[in-house]
Image: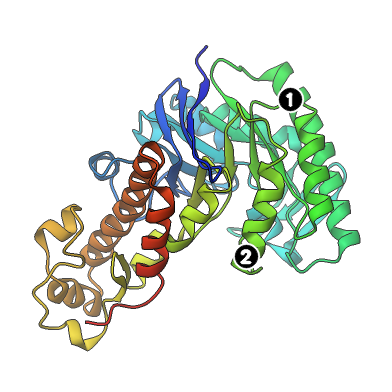
């Protein structure tokens, strides 16, 4: 089979060392996926991503649907060829982006009517349409359309959204079985339920009964506390089949990554390393470096002496501060190269710690080192 997921080792904590085979390559899990919303991880070339060990990237269905359009990308041979990335790609359904439009959208059981943020034109996204777009894009892993709501929503509204997400999942699965190709693409369901334990359990159980190839956990890390995020994640993963991959959407801070892994998560993504880089926030094994600070103006050291990324091997903090203050594009590129490498390196170290039974010790190091700003 083109797709095969295997759990190689399970840590007593619940962390899993795994391997996901796809038509475009193997993903060693747990894995971090750099976010390439428009088919581009902001600031980095595909060669740079390969150089620092990115196994898979994430692209955004909503944005690619609006520009340049799934039809054009399909005519160009699919997303892999269009962006010159021969490795695995995951596309989300566009649900989060659509629902973040607030006043520009109208939701009903059929789908979502919304106005494009680009030109105000009216568009409609149904579960079937979201899959048609992703089938045309040709990503390896594709997602059902779900209804995202605020984490502060009342239980009644949260239950209704989870129920609609389940109905859409059923329609998505039927459409994919009729129009998709399970040899080329792997369809993930998305568990919702907000911060309500019973709703999270029910959402997971209902989706597992439909027997999807993989499962995602959505609607978390959107304003609730980190302990609540972990608690809700654990509620879902405890109900998911052990032999299928699990994806926690939109997380997290470097010091939090291991917390999700020990709750059985295999894949995750986050815009923080790229967004933080563009704003001069750099992650190191001694905490965060805010490169615009004047104390770095004459600092000859690399961002992180313990980092082996191309930026740290060659450039000083003083130079990176100069680039940032001067608003030079190169500064954002070098910062992003470091931050994405740092996330990938954390995940590689987590995989090693699971393999050798040292995950608790490594988790302690992460929490002690990464949550503050550097002091020197």
State the residue at coordinates (31%, 68%): 282
Q: Which residue position holds label 1?
A: 211
Colour style of the rendered protein structure: rainbow
Marker count (numbered): 2
Within 10 Å of disc 2 (Cα), the crowding (few <14, some 14-19, many 20+) is few
Mark-to-mark CA distance, 2 and 1: 29 Å
State the residue at coordinates (61%, 58%): 119
| Outermost residue, right side | 156
Which numbered marker is on residue 227?
2
- Whether residue 346 appears in this view of the structure is yes
Q: Kindly indicate the quadrant of the structure image that contains residue 216.
A: top right
Horizontal arrangement in the rendering, residue 79 relative to residue 189 (left or right): left
- Whether residue 218 appears in this view of the structure is no
Horizontal arrangement in the rendering, residue 347 relative to residue 292 (left or right): right
Q: Is residue 5 above or below residue 288?
A: above
Give residue 60's position: percent from left, percent from top: 54, 46
State the residue at coordinates (22%, 70%): 328
Which numbered marker is on residue 183?
none
Q: Is residue 174 above or below residue 230?
A: above
């Amino acid at each position: 089979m083109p797709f095969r997921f295997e759990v190689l080792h399970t840590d007593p904590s619940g962390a899993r060392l795994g391997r996901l085979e796809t038509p475009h390559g193997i993903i060693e899990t747990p894995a971090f996926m750099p976010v390439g919303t428009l088919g581009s991880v902001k600031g980095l070339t595909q060669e740079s991503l390969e150089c620092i060990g990115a196994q898979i990237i994430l692209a955004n269905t909503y944005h690619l649907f609006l520009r340049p359009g799934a039809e054009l990308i399909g005519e160009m041979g699919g997303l892999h060829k269009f962006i010159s990335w021969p490795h695995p790609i995951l596309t989300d359904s566009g649900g989060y982006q659509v629902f973040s439009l607030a006043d520009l959208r109208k939701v009903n059981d059929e789908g979502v009517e919304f106005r494009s943020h680009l030109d105000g034109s009216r568009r409609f996204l149904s579960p079937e349409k979201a899959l048609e777009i992703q089938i045309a894009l040709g990503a390896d892993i594709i997602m059902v359309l779900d209804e995202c709501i605020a984490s502060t929503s009342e239980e009644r509204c949260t239950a209704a959204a989870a129920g609609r997400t389940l109905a859409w999942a059923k329609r998505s699965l039927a459409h994919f079985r009729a129009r998709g190709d399970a040899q080329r693409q792997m369809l993930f369901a998305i568990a919702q339920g907000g911060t309500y334990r019973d709703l999270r359990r029910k959402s997971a159980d209902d989706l597992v009964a439909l027997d999807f190839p993989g499962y995602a956990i959505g609607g978390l890390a959107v304003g609730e506390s980190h302990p609540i995020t972990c608690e809700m994640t654990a509620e879902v993963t405890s109900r998911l089949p052990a032999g299928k991959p699990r994806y926690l959407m939109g997380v997290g801070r470097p010091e939090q990554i291991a917390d999700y892994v020990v709750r059985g998560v295999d894949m995750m993504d986050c815009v923080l390393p790229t967004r933080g880089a563009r704003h001069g926030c750099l992650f190191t094994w001694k905490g965060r470096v805010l490169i615009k600070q004047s104390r770095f103006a004459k600092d000859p050291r690399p961002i992180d002496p313990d980092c082996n990324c191309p930026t740290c091997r060659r450039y000083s903090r003083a130079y990176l501060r100069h680039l940032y203050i001067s608003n030079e594009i190169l500064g954002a590129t070098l910062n992003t190269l470091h931050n994405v490498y740092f996330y990938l390196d954390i995940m590689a170290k987590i995989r090693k710690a699971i393999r050798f039974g040292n995950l608790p010790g490594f988790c302690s190091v992460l929490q002690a080192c990464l949550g503050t700003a550097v002091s020197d």
